Image (cartoon, grey):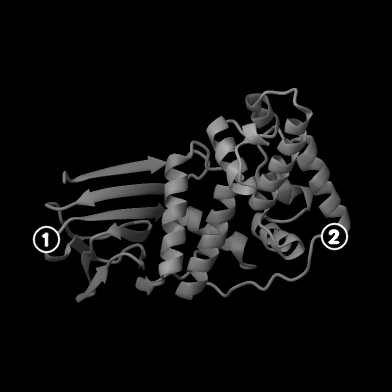
Amino acid sequence: MTDGVEYKRLAGLPGLVLGVGRFKEFSFERHYHLDYHVGLVTDGVQRQCVNGEAVLLGPGRVSLMPPGEIHDGAGESGNAYTLKTFRLSGDLLRDVAAEVTDSDHREPGLNGMMLEDRTLAAQLLQLHDAMRLSPDASALCVQSEWLSLLHCLFARSGAIKPVAIKGALSPVHWQRLKDYCLFHLAEKITLDELATLCGLGRFHFLRRFKQTIGMTPHAWLLRLRLERACSLLARGKPTIAEVAQGVGFYDQSHFNRAFRQAFGVAPSAY
């Protein structure tokens, strides 16, 4: 195994840096950061020393490291491990905290800690991979997961008080959303656009949409695209590639996988 680190910045999310490091020989000497770190290990174990106490970061755990916290890091017993990190600037933290709470733009009081939560760790790793591999950080699924998981992370750490958002979307707003999505089905549809249609912030819109429909906006829109694809395929005239593009899939292989997962057959067999 060769030691190495890769970093990625996302144009749609200034203040966020994603990191993937694979280490065996390399060890982190005592250091600190000016931004906030969320760390996850996918295989192996990293031993950290924080405030004179040794802690182990392995699969199923989430490391929360605030600015200024002095720590180190090395593979447990000299073994290799893979570390994935979210680096969040203070400005980004304040923006997200303001969006998922009813507070002003004060930076949340995030403390250093180790969370033992396999479900949350798996969801964060899935989001990390999606953000790192996606060319577009403003995609509906990415933005939705980003806000929801950060809200969960802040709440679990005690940095914020969870917001109780009650009530559903009004019939007017719901009809407006359906009409907009059907009209723009072949185009990219963002969380910002849908929330603006209802006059809501993105996080409040996510919660109200889920309470109204019982699905996330991304899952509902994906199903709408696939149902519309069935109607087009039944006509027998457009090609599969034309159908995929016409309902908003820019990658035909992605369309084929989604269609098979939803209906049990490939589009060509429908």
Q: Which residue is mark 2?
A: 170
Residue occupying the point 56% across, 57% down: 147
Relative depth, front residue between 117 and 161: 117
The part of the image, by quadrant, that contains residue 116 is bottom left
The location of residue 23, given as percent across then percent down, is 19, 52
Q: Are marks 2 and 1 in contact (CB under 8 Å)?
A: no
The single residue placed furthest to the front in the displayed view is 269
* Residue 178 to residue 100: above or below: above
Q: Which residue is mark 1?
A: 78
- Identified by mark 2, the residue type is Ser
Pick the quarter of the image with the C terminus.
top right
Residue occupying the point 34% across, 72% down: 114
| Secondary structure category for the residue under label 1 | helix
Q: Is residue 229 visible?
A: yes
Relative depth, front residue between 270 and 227: 270
* Residue 171 to residue 132: above or below: below
The part of the image, by quadrant, that contains residue 245 is top right
The location of residue 97, given as percent across then percent down, is 55, 62
- Identified by mark 1, the residue type is Gly
Distance between the alpha carbons at the discs numbered 2 and 1: 58 Å
* Residue 78 to residue 222: above or below: below
